[in-house]
């Protein structure tokens, strides 16, 4: 019977593997066929249709053939793709305007600003930008403020009440399960550890969050006021008194232009496109438009500006679509450094930081590359702690006004699970050792003061390395640098004022600076993005692994799955971290 079951199991596995390989073959054939298609033909009076109710990643330049199979409700759209399509549509004689479905874009304010600026440039052509939504978040309102006309469904809703930032604290959970965090840090503002040792924000943390949230708020509401031709004081009055409760209120107070159903929106689009009311609208979606004729002319292939995208947490080793692996980054940087066709490099950094070791390894390679060709940093929504560690080694740092940056500091965190193991689970430990610190650090007993001091000294040394290298990179006395360090978080505007950033601007500004450094004018160079998109096989394996893991967590833990994911992340962290104080969402 046992032998029979073995044969049955082997047969089932064989069938599964054969089916999987067949799927890969079909996908491969489909990809080859699609790659050989002719360019998309654009009809006259067409409208570029963008759906921004997605997760907006920095560089998602390849169509995902598995989005329907492994969808978790968060489709990705590449910021690079969006900006390229908008720029091309500006010059395309067959494109009359842009229509955007805009409700809850999943992006930071800096990415929203990049798209917003691209739309402002698009409108210089005289073409229209229309937006439609059933509900609108604060970020959607900010982006729609540059639209020629912005529609909101009469039965819909709008969030326009100011910004807030909320932190989840887990100390109560750890107290209940018998886990005691052991903390090592430098800097009163290095607050990553607070959710594990407090039940609320420290006064220092509350102060810094209040200040940078105020800086972001001032920027975006000032920009909205400028576009709408009203004063910032009027905007603040609307926010403070919560005057916008219904869609009609948004029009009354000039935040949106129209209230209307989708058919009324379509009628407005037809009028704007100059077609008959009885005619059918001709839309072209982003995926198709990527294969349309290119009107933005590129320069010589022998003159390239490389944009290396670094997005996600910083880790040692190989990275993936959600992390910056030091080995992966080094490979890309070295290829760009040694490629004679690449004249300058822009690092597009969108990272809250992570491993202090990996950050330092990448910093070193940036220093070596700088000796060969210019390296410019462009900060996305966040380039803090380890993210700033990467940027501080560059020739010039460019940040958007709403970028979250700084957080120059180091921390270490361990967990003493003795109570959980001994008293809650009945598990005990015993052993022998040859030397005093052979079993240090320990997660199953209280560490001695001497053991803790060893780790704290390591954290202190890491902080001195971080600050001294930052001071050298910024050409700033170490004493002055430390005044703005201590783990303090700044916006791009604030960082420029204190000397941590050189220029306020987006990725295009960083590319332009890089080109000027090597005496290249617009039209004389090409911009190439790295790393290249993953192959279909790599995408499916990554998605399959991730979806299986998330499904198991949800199945067993339900609403507690996010907490388990956080604890797993903490378990896998390296000893020393250069990371943004916390996982904070501004909304």
Image (cartoon, rainbow, N blue to C red):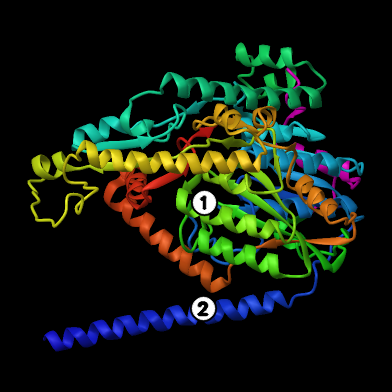
In the picture shown, does residue 304 fall above or below 583?
A: below
Given residues 462 and 11, the one toward you in this image is: 462
Q: Is residue 129 in the magenta section?
A: no
Given residues 495 and 3, the one toward you in this image is: 495
Q: Which residue: 66% across, 42% down?
A: 111
**From the image, which quarter does the N terminus lie in?**
bottom left
Q: Is residue 559 left or right of residue 529?
A: left
Q: Which residue is mark 2?
A: 24
In the rendered image, residue 431, in percent from the top left (x then y), is placed at: 9, 55
Callout 2–callout 1 Cβ contact below 8 Å: no
The range drawn in magenta is 253-282
Disc on the earlier residue, 2 or 1: 2
Q: Is residue 95 left or right of residue 527?
A: right
Q: Secondary structure at mark 1?
A: helix
**From the image, which quarter does the C terminus lie in?**
top right
Q: In this rendering, does residue 533 appear at all?
A: no
Q: Is residue 260 in the magenta section?
A: yes
In the rendered image, residue 93, in percent from the top left (x then y), is placed at: 92, 55
Count residues near mark 1 (Cα–Cα under 10 Å), then give few for <14, some for 14-19, many for 20+.
many
Q: CA distance from mark 2 to mark 1?
A: 36 Å
Which mark is on residue 546?
A: none
In the rendered image, residue 147, in percent from the top left (x then y), is placed at: 78, 35
In the picture shown, does residue 350 fall above or below 401?
A: below
Given residues 138 and 133, the one toward you in this image is: 138
Q: Which residue is mark 1?
A: 359
Mark 2 vs mark 1, foreground winner is 1
Count residues near mark 2 (Cα–Cα under 10 Å), then give few for <14, some for 14-19, many for 20+.
some
Q: In this rendering, does residue 501 appear at all?
A: yes
Q: Secondary structure at mark 2?
A: helix
In the picture shown, does residue 29 fall above or below 128?
A: below
In the rendered image, residue 68, in percent from the top left (x then y), is placed at: 53, 61
């Amino acid at each position: 019977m046992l032998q029979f079951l073995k044969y049955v199991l082997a047969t089932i596995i064989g069938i599964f593997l054969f089916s999987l390989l067949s799927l890969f073959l079909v996908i491969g054939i489909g990809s080859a066929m699609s790659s050989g298609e002719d360019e998309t033909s654009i009809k006259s009076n067409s409208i570029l249709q963008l759906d921004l109710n997605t997760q907006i990643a920095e560089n998602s330049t390849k169509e995902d053939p598995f989005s329907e199979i492994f969808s978790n409700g968060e489709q990705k759209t590449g910021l690079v793709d969006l900006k390229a399509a908008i720029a091309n549509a500006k010059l395309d004689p067959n494109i009359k305007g842009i229509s955007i479905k805009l409700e809850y874009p999943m992006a930071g304010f800096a990415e929203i600003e990049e798209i917003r600026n691209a739309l402002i440039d698009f409108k210089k052509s005289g073409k229209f930008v229309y937006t439609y939504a059933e509900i609108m978040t604060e970020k959607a309102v900010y982006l729609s403020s540059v639209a020629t006309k912005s529609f909101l469904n009469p039965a819909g809703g709008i969030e326009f009440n100011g910004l807030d930032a909320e932190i989840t604290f887990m100390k109560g959970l750890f107290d209940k399960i018998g886990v005691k965090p052991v903390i090592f840090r430098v800097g009163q503002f290095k607050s990553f550890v607070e959710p594990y040792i407090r039940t609320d924000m420290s006064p220092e943390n509350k102060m810094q969050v209040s200040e940078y949230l105020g800086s972001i708020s001032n920027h975006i509401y000032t920009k909205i006021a400028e576009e709408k031709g009203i004063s910032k004081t009027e905007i603040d009055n609307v926010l403070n008194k919560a005057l916008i409760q219904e869609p009609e209120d948004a029009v009354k107070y000039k935040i949106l232009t129209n209230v209307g159903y989708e058919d009324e929106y379509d009628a407005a689009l037809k009028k704007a496109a100059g077609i008959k009311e009885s005619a059918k609208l001709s839309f072209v979606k982003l995926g198709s438009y990527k294969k349309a004729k290119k009107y933005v002319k590129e320069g010589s292939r022998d003159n390239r500006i490389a944009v290396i995208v670094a997005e996600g947490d910083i880790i040692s080793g190989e990275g993936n679509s959600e992390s910056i692996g030091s080995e992966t980054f080094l490979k890309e940087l070295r290829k760009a450094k040694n490629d004679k066709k690449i004249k300058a490099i822009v690092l597009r950094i969108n990272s809250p930081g992570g491993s202090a070791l990996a950050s330092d390894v990448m910093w070193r390679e940036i220093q070596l590359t700088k000796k060969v060709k210019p390296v410019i940093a462009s900060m996305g929504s966040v380039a803090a702690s380890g993210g700033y560690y990467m940027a501080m080694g560059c020739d010039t740092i460019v940040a958007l006004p709403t970028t979250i940056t700084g957080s120059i500091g180091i921390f270490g965190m361990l967990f003493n699970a003795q109570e959980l193991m001994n008293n809650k689970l009945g598990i005990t430990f015993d052993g022998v050792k040859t030397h005093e610190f052979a079993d240090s650090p320990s997660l199953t007993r209280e560490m001695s003061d001497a053991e803790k001091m060893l780790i704290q000294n390591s954290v202190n040394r890491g902080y001195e390395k971080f600050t001294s290298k930052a001071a050298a990179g910024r050409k700033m006395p170490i004493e002055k640098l430390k005044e703005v360090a201590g783990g303090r978080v700044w916006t791009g505007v604030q960082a420029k004022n204190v000397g941590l950033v050189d220029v306020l601007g987006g990725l295009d500004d960083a590319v332009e600076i890089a080109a000027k450094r090597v005496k290249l004018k617009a039209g004389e160079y090409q911009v190439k993005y790295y790393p290249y998109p993953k192959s279909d096989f790599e995408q499916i394996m990554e998605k399959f692994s991730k979806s299986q893991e998330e499904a198991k967590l949800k199945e067993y833990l339900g609403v507690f799955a996010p907490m388990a994911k956080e604890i797993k992340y903490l378990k896998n962290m390296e000893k020393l971290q250069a990371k943004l104080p916390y996982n904070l969402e501004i909304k």
